[in-house]
């Protein structure tokens, strides 16, 4: 299973790739029939406005789909699929291709039958219907959700060939919801209320303890994603949004919030979602997703097919600590770095899109990206991470990814030593 290939940085990269100047993209040869002949779509009427009450992508985009890794999918109701990051641009993940992670399948809930209860150390225990919740003042925020296990299979070496698989347990969505603070204050938090337990209504009854400070800071109880209702697989009709923190805490199908004076020590915060160190001890309550980035194109599933010349290198970066301030890109395995251009909104705890436009001379590249957040925290190399945390872990791998671009434009997942 482990295809680890180690390359000596620099040895395989030859000529320089310099910043793009004037574009020299060749014009099509004369007599191209798609220009000289009238095409069917030009000759005949297209579909009417009644053809697709709810629209779908073009049939030519049929490969832009979530995918599984077969050997990770013992049973689809307790598994994961991955966002096709290599096909996306900008910062928003479209609803139909947001990765899914369920521990007990995707619950199908009629919102008329859904309730949110607040109990525990509160002045007044409360139960809300969905209609009740939609009468509270609401907010809109764009946040990334990254599973703590994203890139987990890469801890011991490069393994999965594609950023969809190595980095696709992430999505970036605009949520509409009510600040958790509003609802907790409606119930009245008792002075010894220091933690909140969030519980899901699915068969897994996912439960996580969240410190009160975070609950009051920026958590949302969300019912919409990218403007429309949450998708069933994303927790319809209600999910918790825990900005910048590991995806496991973002309880879907949210049905109960209990206020307590200490964490509950649930399975998902003891045997799971803890990081086993080399000395046998485990890091616990490792909530924040640290700065991370990946080049999405070129990448193994998005090879270079146009030959040498102008090449758009692009990728995404994010940090659970706030905004990404800078992304550097290396084409020689981390020896030299060039600051990439961040384009589009730069929002706290949201994905950022970066570009480096170069003139590729056709020689092999060792592509890397490195994010730095607004607090000056740099994304580490994989070896720096292993030196700190050993090789047992699955969670919180934010190490620098390397793609080996070969002269023929194909790309492979590798590590540099
Ligand atoms: N909430 C419930 N109720 N049940 C679950 O199985 N999975 C968690 C979290 N919330 C889960 C849940 C995990 S591990 C992650 S990474 C995120 O939801 C995934 O969210 P998504 O399916 O919207 O990508
Ligand atoms: Co997860």
Image (tube, grey):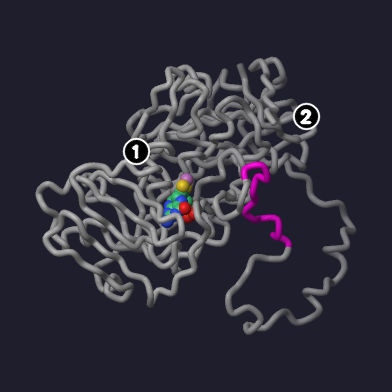
Label 1: element kind: loop
Q: Is the magenta stretch mostly helix, strand or loop?
A: loop
Give 318 or 162, whichever is nearer the viewer. 162
Residue 150 image position (x, y, % from top left): 52, 39
- State which quadrant residue 286 falls in: top left
**Label 2 secondary element:** loop
Pointers 2 and 1 in contact (CB under 8 A)?
no
Give the answer, above or below, for where 308 lies relative to 99: above
**Whole-number angstrom distance, CA of label 2 to CA of label 1:** 38 Å
Q: Is residue 246 above or below residue 179?
A: above
Q: Quadrant of the C terminus?
A: top right
Dot label at residue 407:
2
**For mark 2, does the 10 Å Cα neighbourhood hold few (<14), some (14 to 19), or many (20 or more) residues?**
some
Q: In this view, does 389 lie to the left or right of 191?
A: right
Crowding near the residue tagged with mark 1, few <14, some 14–19, many ≥20 C-alpha atoms within 10 Å: some
User: Residue at left 64%, top 65%?
Assistant: 57
Write the start and end of the magenta stretch as one range.
Answer: 60-72
- Is residue 30 in sight in this rendering? yes
The residue to which callout 1 is attached is: 321
Magenta region includes residue 63: yes
Residue 54 placement: quadrant: bottom right
């Amino acid at each position: 299973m482990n295809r680890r290939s180690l390359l000596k940085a620099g040895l395989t990269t030859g000529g320089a790739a310099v910043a793009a100047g004037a574009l020299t993209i060749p014009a099509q040869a004369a007599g191209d029939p798609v220009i000289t002949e009238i095409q069917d779509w030009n000759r005949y009427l297209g579909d009417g406005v009644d053809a697709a009450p709810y629209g779908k992508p073009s049939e030519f985009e049929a490969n832009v789909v979530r995918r599984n890794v077969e050997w990770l999918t013992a049973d689809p109701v307790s598994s994961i699929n991955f966002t096709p990051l290599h096909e996306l641009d900008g910062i928003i993940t479209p609803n139909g291709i947001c990765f899914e992670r369920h521990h007990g399948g995707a619950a199908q809930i009629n919102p008329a039958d859904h309730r949110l209860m607040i109990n525990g150390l509160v002045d007044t225990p409360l139960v809300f219907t969905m209609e009740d919740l939609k009468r509270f003042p609401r907010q809109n925020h764009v946040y990334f959700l990254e599973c703590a296990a994203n890139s987990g299979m890469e801890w011991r070496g490069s393994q999965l060939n594609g950023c969809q698989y190595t980095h696709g347990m992430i999505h970036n969505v605009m949520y509409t919801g009510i600040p958790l603070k509003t609802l907790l204050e409606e119930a009245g938090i008792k002075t010894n209320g220091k933690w909140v337990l969030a519980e899901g209504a699915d068969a897994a009854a996912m439960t996580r303890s969240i410190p009160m400070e975070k609950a009051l800071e920026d958590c949302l109880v969300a019912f919409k994603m990218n403007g429309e209702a949450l998708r069933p697989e994303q927790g319809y009709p209600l999910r918790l949004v825990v900005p910048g923190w590991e995806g496991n805490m973002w309880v879907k199908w949210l049905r109960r919030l209990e206020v307590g004076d200490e964490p509950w020590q649930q399975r998902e915060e003891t045997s799971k979602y803890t990081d086993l160190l080399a000395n046998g001890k485990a890091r616990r309550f490792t909530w924040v997703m640290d700065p991370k980035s990946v080049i999405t194109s070129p990448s193994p599933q998005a090879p270079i097919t146009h030959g040498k010349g102008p090449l758009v290198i692009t990728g995404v970066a994010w940090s659970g600590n706030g905004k990404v301030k800078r992304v550097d890109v290396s084409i020689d395995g981390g020896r030299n770095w060039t600051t990439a251009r961040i384009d589009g909104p730069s929002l706290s705890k949201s994905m950022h899109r970066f570009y480096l436009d170069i003139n590729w001379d056709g020689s092999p590249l060792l592509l890397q990206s490195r994010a730095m957040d607004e607090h000056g925290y740099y994304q580490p190399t994989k070896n720096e991470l292993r030196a700190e945390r050993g090789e047992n872990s699955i969670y919180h791998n934010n190490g620098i990814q390397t793609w080996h671009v070969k002269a023929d434009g194909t790309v492979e997942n590798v590590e540099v030593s």
